[in-house]
Image: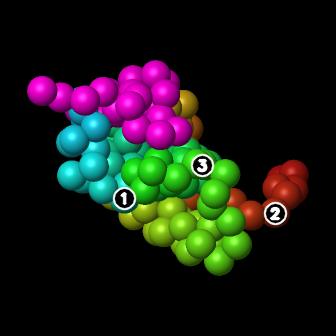
Amino acid sequence: MTTPISSIRNLGPAMEAAFARAEIASAEQLRALGADRAYAALLTAGERPHFIGYYVLVMGLQGRPWNDCKGAEKDALRVRFDALKAAHQQAGGIAGIEAILDEIGVIDPAGPRRGKQRGP
């Protein structure tokens, strides 16, 4: 018997649907993967990175309310989130509108430019 992902504290139908798109179908599977691997699967499936979604997941897997994440713990989770996001981007994992823009050649392969562009 499998338990729905939405049975985990803080995770509702939207997160359940997102995990389904990432081929994570049950609370048991999500718990076995852990927050970091499961979140990486979400990114690979095309979900946009969002820090709040990440720490809500971490808190939920610990059985804690999402707003229990504060101070040094939240800072440490931000470091983990940024590392997950960076690893995903280095692996070529762009998604959504960025993937479409890349496909048609709009995204600069050199990456974003800093500062204002001046005329010719």
Q: Residue at x 40, y 29 (%)?
A: 6
Residue 111 placement: quadrant? bottom right
In the figure, is residue 118 to the left or right of 16?
right
| Type of amino acid at the residue the image marks with label 2 | Gly
Task: Give the labeled residue for mark 1.
Answer: 36
- In the image, the segment drawn in magenta is 1-23
Quadrant for the N terminus, please: top left
**Residue 82: percent from the left, percent from the top?**
53, 65
Q: Residue at x 65, y 77 (%)?
A: 72
Q: Residues within 10 Å of mark 3 (few under 14, many from 20)?
A: some
Label 1: which secondary element: helix
Vertical comparison of 26 with 107: above or below: above
Q: Earlier in the sequence, mark 3 or mark 2?
A: 3
| Type of amino acid at the residue the image marks with label 3 | Trp
Q: Which mark is on residue 66?
A: 3
Q: Which mark is on residue 94?
A: none
Vertical comparison of 12 with 102: above or below: above
Q: CA–CA distance between discs 1 and 2?
A: 33 Å
